[in-house]
Amino acid sequence: MSEYLVVRHCSPTLAGIKTGNLFSCVCPCLKDLIKGLSDLNKKLTSKGICILPLRVCRNRALIYVYRLHALKRDLENPCARDLLLQYGYRPENPRACVLHLIRRIRSAGEFPHEIGLFLSYPPEDVLGFIRNNACGHKCSGCWKVYGDEQKAKNTFEKYNVCSKTYFQLWQQGKSIEQLTVAG
């Protein structure tokens, strides 16, 4: 697991402006993936970041990078809480929610679209996506928007600027530890 992938795909989380990011990567060797994730977690845990594989199959890994304290705050939203309860989550326990999400992703069933709640998507947009089968959205960027379109566009731009800035700084020699905001 390379720092490049984390900086490239997870800068808003590293910057502390987003709860979590998700990305897929090639995984030819599970042992190497676990070692790489362990090394990254050693560097970033003290800053409030956790990195773990949600699923590994067919030489690909789905990686979740998140801030537990921010996830706790997000899951306290009444709309998020109600939605998670419908899918068997215990919103009062964010760690248990992540474990339940992993079980849902690894099951043979439908992809758990509530995952947006773990990625700072507005609960009304996650709910809109589920209720409307991904149709009828107002706009899309990092996610499909069913609620406040202008607020979402502003957030998309903020994430985009953050990602570009962080990647440039990383290319100029800043370490992932230097780029990660403590939180």
Image (spheres, grey):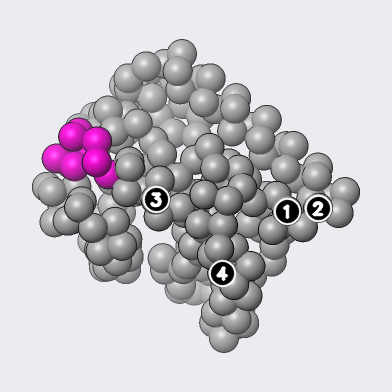
The amino acid type found where label 4 is placed reads: Asn
Residue 136 location (% of width, % of height): 31, 21
Give the prevailing secondary structure in the magenta stretch. helix
* Mark toward the viewer: 3 or 2: 3
The residue identified by callout 1 is: 178
Task: Tell me if residue 99 comes above or below residue 89 in the rendering.
Answer: below
Q: Which quarter of the rendering shows the N terminus? A: bottom right
Residue 88 location (% of width, % of height): 13, 56
Determine which of the numbered discs, if any, sits on residue 69 in the image: 3
**Cα gap from disc 1 to disc 4, whole angstroms:** 14 Å
Determine which of the numbered discs, if any, sits on residue 174 in the image: 2
Q: Are marks 1 and 4 in contact (CB under 8 Å)?
A: no
**Cα gap from disc 1 to disc 3, whole angstroms:** 20 Å
Residue 3 appears anywhere in the view: yes
Is residue 81 one of those drawn in magenta? yes
**Cα gap from disc 3 to disc 4, whole angstroms:** 16 Å
Q: Are marks 3 and 4 in contact (CB under 8 Å)?
A: no
**SS class of the residue under badge 1?**
helix
The amino acid type found where label 1 is placed reads: Gln
Which residue does the image show at 55% across and 63% down from the upper left?
46
Question: From which residue to which does the magenta span run?
Answer: 75-83
Which residue does the image show at 28% across and 52% down from the upper left?
112
